[in-house]
Image (cartoon, rainbow, N blue to C red):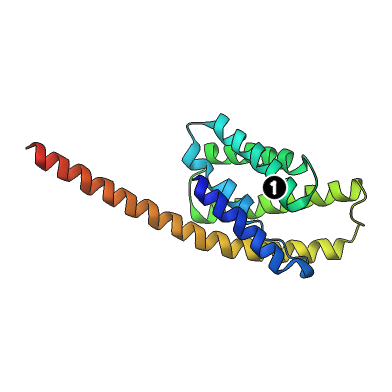
Amino acid sequence: MYIFLIINFFLEMFFGRLFSYQNINALFFLVSLILIYPILTNSKKQYFYILFISGFIYDIVITNIISINSLLFLLIGYINTLYVQNFNDKFINNFVFLNLILILYKALLYIFMIMVEISNFNILNFACNLLITLLINSIYYIFISIFIRKIKRWSYAWITRSWKCKKEIRK
């Protein structure tokens, strides 16, 4: 799980550097933070700890705005825990939820940047950036979701085979 987060963090950094002149945001790291919660359903405390530390590191390395992403990641994590508890794990539900979370994240970050005068209000710029972000992250979510489901099936099949072999050995 930590390796998955680190890979996504560096992937987002690489993508950000590659397209920095076009103001394209790939929020792969945020997507990965949303996707790991079902793995950590037994430990909300650990999940929120990971979110806070990840947000702090994200602030230092990528955005240079200390504490805003730590707070936003915690808010998104809280919403994510409520979603996982109340809705079933269907691909389309998760897809819609992820896009709503990305819209919320971008809107709150944009409002914050306007409030502290880092950015000027330009709804067209925000809308274009948001659409590109949703498109990139939707494609990424589809690929990573398929990958995670295949790993779950493979690990389940491997565990089932191992368990059957152990039962046969005991007989």
Q: Callout 1: few (<14), some (14-19), or many (20+) C-alpha neighbours within 10 Å? A: many
Q: Amino acid at mark 1?
A: Tyr
Residue 18 lies in quadrant: bottom right
Q: Which residue is depicted at the point 89% across and 55% down?
A: 119
Q: How many marks?
A: 1
**Closer-to-camera residue (77/65):** 65
> Can residue 10 be seen in the rendering of this structure?
yes
Q: Which residue is depicted at the point 47% across and 41% down?
A: 39
Seen from this angle, which residue lies furthest front?
Answer: 61
Residue 16, percent from left and from top? 70, 62
Please determine whether, in this image, residue 29 is positioned above or below residue 47: below
Residue 80 falls left or right of residue 162: right
Residue 62, percent from left and from top? 73, 53
Q: Secondary structure at mark 1?
A: helix
Q: From the image, which quarter does the C terminus lie in?
A: top left
Residue 48, percent from left and from top? 61, 34
> Can residue 96 be seen in the rendering of this structure?
no
Residue 105 falls left or right of residue 7: right
Please determine whether, in this image, residue 43 is positioned above or below residue 130: above
Residue 1, percent from left and from top? 49, 45
Residue 53 lies in quadrant: top right
Name the residue beneath numbered marker 1. 58
Seen from this angle, which residue lies furthest left?
Answer: 171
Q: Which residue is depicted at the point 80% across and 46% down?
A: 65
**Closer-to-camera residue (93/64):** 64
Q: Which residue is depicted at the point 57% across and 36% down?
A: 47
**Closer-to-camera residue (68/133):** 68
Residue 170 lies in quadrant: top left
